[in-house]
Amino acid sequence: MQYKYRSLIVAATLLCACTQDAGKDDSYDPAHDYFSFARTDQFITDHLALDLRVDFEMRELRGSVSLDMRRLEPEAKEIVLDTRDLSVSNAQVELPDGSFVPAEFRFGEQDDVMGTPLIVSLPATADVASEFRLVIDYATSPRSTALQWLPAELTAGSEQPMMFSQSQAIHARSWVPLQDTPAVRVTYEAVIQTPPELLAVMSASNELPVVRDGEYSFDMPQPIPAYLLAIAVGNFYFAPLGETTGVYTEPELLDASVYEFADTQAMLEQAESLFGPYEWGRYDLLVLPPSFPYGGMENPRLSFITPSLLAGDRSLVSVIAHELAHSWSGNLVTNATWRDGWLNEGMTSYLESRLMEVIYDKDRVDEERVLGYRELLLDFESVPPAMQALAPRLDKGDPDDFQGTIHYHKGQLFLQYLENAFGRDAFDEFLGAYFDEFAFRTITTERFLDYLDEKLLQAEGSAVTRAEAEQWLYKPGLPDDAPIPYSLSLDAAEAVATAWAEGKIDAGEIPIATWSPQATVHFINSLPADLAADRLSELDQVLGLSDTRNAEIGRTWFIQVAKRRHTAAYEMLEQHLNRYGRGRLIYPVYLALAENGADRELAQTMFESARSAYHPLIDAGIARALKESEQ
């Protein structure tokens, strides 16, 4: 996922109880998922089958889920599943002989973060069954944290409604009762019934050619964790991008999406040459409305993508490279708990940079590495030291709010450090073996460390010790010998910012047309803090920063507008907050506005005006952060 913008204010307040070093507390188990009720030591799910009807009027999914389960502990008699805001009407167990037996069920105590455990008692006739199928009839709530129900007027076509899911990190439980932990991987199938004029798609096999008939069948033969369960229903159309790639979106966005993502097939083939075989069949994209909360979500076979990437010049395709790279790091080899999230995101950020070197060149990638490094330094200022480790203690708080982007950027630097130490060829050989060894499995940080130690660190003449690797994984900040990225082109953009601010060149002489978006972002961030308002207006008028189609440039500019109280651009700032729902693009703008010393109430007013179009996760995060800013 690129990037899941996490609430640093919330992180600082929630994690005060998580600062104790794990090694000093025998009760803390780093391999345990503290954000699931499921007793995976007693029962495990192997396969999941959904039979659901999509009801836009009620804003609910209604039907059943069948869980093919195995009993691991012979004496275990109660199955505990994760749920949030689900209503359950019936539960029954199908035995190996095909007979069905009613099962008693009850809900446990509700938790504000984790939801509510669903406890199913196995009937006595199933006492000796080591394998069985549990069938649960249920319905979702309009309050589901995973599902966004969009009225027609909030879609591109303004004629048909839309619904889409976002299951990461622990939101699958709000649309399916299941063992919602990345430690459990399942194959799945589904039958989805919709209004006949709409199309359903899932993170599974999507039938081509598309036939709209109101009933759609799906199959995912590769086992995936619950957070990769994904569904969307809307007025979607399909266009091929290559032999095994394509794009779904509303017809109003189809041509722009085909142009923007035209190189996806070539990118897939280049990724295979770098990382090994692509194990998922097709790789398609689904471009959603602006309310999609993240840059992209790596749902296997069908990445969900923000329309904010449609810049018209293919300048933001690094997000596609990131989601594609997740097909190896994250989807193929998955973090066992959310405390190990760097194994997904840090590894993927490293693979993304390697892939982008092939697509563009090293100079362009160095620009992105520098910007990521600077973002990391900002995170270090906000995230408590105990949470700056790649694998921190994580048994409290909310897995959606814990590390800023540290697990992305620090994880990428760690892997770059290893590549530098052992050489690219040796490190590529290690990565290939790693993906082969742990394919379709989940692993902890400790298992990764042991594997790294076995394959590289113990080699004769190794340039890295286990203790040095552990410093990256378990200590705050960066080691003294961390590789610091450098970019000549960003240095040049910074020099232009200084020259313009000092009156040595006119705004018309700034060569923004020849720059990458990353250079423009760096130029904006390099402007002196004491620039007068008329100078900022001049810059905006000449360069058109408030009117940019590039969402990353707009994000950077409006953060500065808010910080500097450049009120002349506030109208365009508000348009930016209404145009996008992606957290990365709007969250820091709201925070900058709320924290500039004068505009907290204005930030709240703008938020109240725009929030009805935001995804529930983004709405809740911004509301929480603005409330915290009052203190």
Image (cartoon, helix red, strand yellow):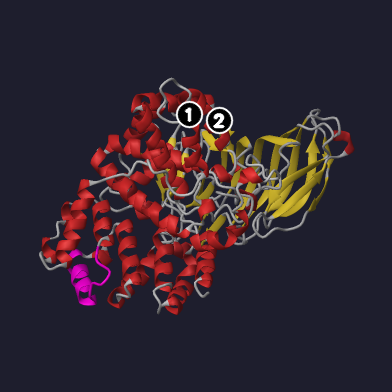
Instruction: Find numbered disc 1 in the image and state the secondary structure of the residue it sits on.
Output: loop
Identify residue for label 1: 279
Q: Nearer the viewer, mark 2 or mark 1?
A: 2
- Residue ID at (47%, 75%): 604
Instruction: Find numbered disc 2 in the image and state the secondary structure of the residue it sits on.
Output: loop
Is residue 202 visible in the rendered image? The answer is no
- Please name the amino acid that badge 2 sits on: Phe
Identify residue for label 2: 440
The total number of labels drawn is: 2
- In magenta segment, residue 536: yes
Depth order, front residue of 476/268: 476
Callout 1 crowding tier (Cα within 10 Å): few <14, some 14–19, many ≥20: some
Depth order, front residue of 5/117: 5
Say whether marks 2 and 1 touch (CB < 8 Å): yes
x, y percentage for residue 589?
Answer: 39, 66
Q: Quadrant of residue 157?
A: bottom left
Specify the segment rendered in magenta: 527-543
- Please name the amino acid that badge 1 sits on: Glu
- In magenta segment, residue 530: yes
x, y percentage for residue 218?
Answer: 56, 38
- 417 vs 136, left or right, is left
x, y percentage for residue 252?
Answer: 36, 54
From what the image shows, is residue 196 above or below residue 270?
below
- 310 vs 289, left or right, is left
Q: State which tag comes first along the sequence, 2 or 1.
A: 1
- Residue ID at (29%, 42%): 365
